[in-house]
Image (cartoon, rainbow, N blue to C red):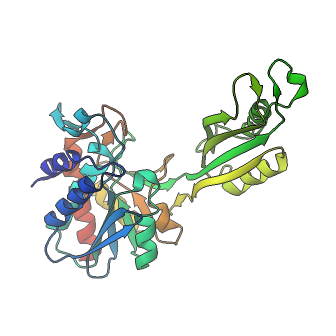
Amino acid sequence: MNIEEMTEELVKLRTVEGNLGEIEKGLQLVEKELPEDFDIQRFEEEGEKSLLATRGEPQILLHGHIDVVDAKDSLFRPERRNGRIYGRGTADMKSGIACIIEAAQKVEAENLGILITSDEERGGFNGTGHVTEETGIEPELVISAEPDDSGHFPSIVTEQKGVLQLELKASGENAHASKPDRGENAAEKLLKKYMEFRSGFNHEAEFGTTINLGNISAEGPVNQIPDKASLQVDIRYSNQYPKEEVLRDLEEMGGLEYEVLAEAPMLETSEENSGAQALKTSAEEVSGETVDFRRENFASDMRFFTEKGVPAVCFGPEGYNLHAEDEYVEVESLEAYCEILKSFLRSELN
């Protein structure tokens, strides 16, 4: 099965949250295509399945996630046109998985590992997070085949923002809506405080910390002044305004209670790391292009490695419109990406 065919076979599987049968089929397909000399370990945490394949003690670990965000049925029927493969997961990131398998088939090197998980779109805690804790695996470099949508393929991501999701809560006092002076509107108080909090974020800063109001709710009917209100925010933080400063400012502002719903650290790998430099060299030699290290706003499972001091990068084939109806991967980039991976693995492992 070649790269395009495997990409299409994986895309046909509706590997969305809770669809355990399709996820299992995907992992079985990966396992079937792997060389027979790989040792296979399976992991499951809270129903989320992962597969770790190793040949020796992994010096290089290749990573991919088989899960996708849900979509209408037609997007699980891959379509080739104009040098592209369209469909859910073509870019994010089943084509990357197909390339990882192709590289493993063609490079007979020891000390190579492959980790395929099924919960990255929900934070990766039961997949990559669980496997790293369970195994203590510490390769010299981890490469996640996340798609390159920079418009400058090939490029290597060495830094990604962290995630901080909060629920902000305000309390007031009930009264009839016709007599607002007799109560304290918790929703209005909450919105006023939120705007004060939001003013501390500079969305124009280069690689700056951002905040997004995801939803808001208040208790009671429309003809009553609400005494309870809450909203949820998604903060993507960088060193421009780190998490610790965000929470400090929120506490010093006062007037609100808050709860941390989820958090994840930044991905930070030095551009001077020898593995990252070797990958850059292979990419430039194969592509004939100048390859840049870059930052990316979204988070990935690679943070589970870098928070433990293990260097990790995101580097994958050229794909666009992640999570959208017209998601696609550039077919031409698949072969180029595979050649870069093979060149890199041969230089580092042989």
Location of residue 29 with respect to 69 vertically, above or below: below
Q: Is residue 18 left or right of residue 110?
A: right
Which quarter of the rendering shows the N terminus? bottom left
Residue 115 placement, left or right of 207 = left
Q: Quadrant of residue 64?
A: bottom left
Q: Nearer the viewer, residue 291 or 334?
A: 334
Query: How far across and down, in percent of the image, does residue 278 sit?
Result: 35, 65
Please tell me which residue is depicted at 33% across the width and 48% down the height of the picture.
Answer: 16
Q: Is residue 155 left or right of residue 219?
A: left
Q: Position of residue 192 (x, y in %)?
A: 78, 32
Count of numbered circles on the image: 0
Q: Compare residues 67 and 173 and report the one nearer the observer.
A: 173
Which quadrant would residue 74 be assigned to in this image? top left
> Which quadrant would the C terminus be assigned to in this image?
bottom left
Q: Residue at x 39, y 56 (%)?
A: 119
Is residue 287 visible in this depiction of the protein?
no
The residue at the far left in this view is 1
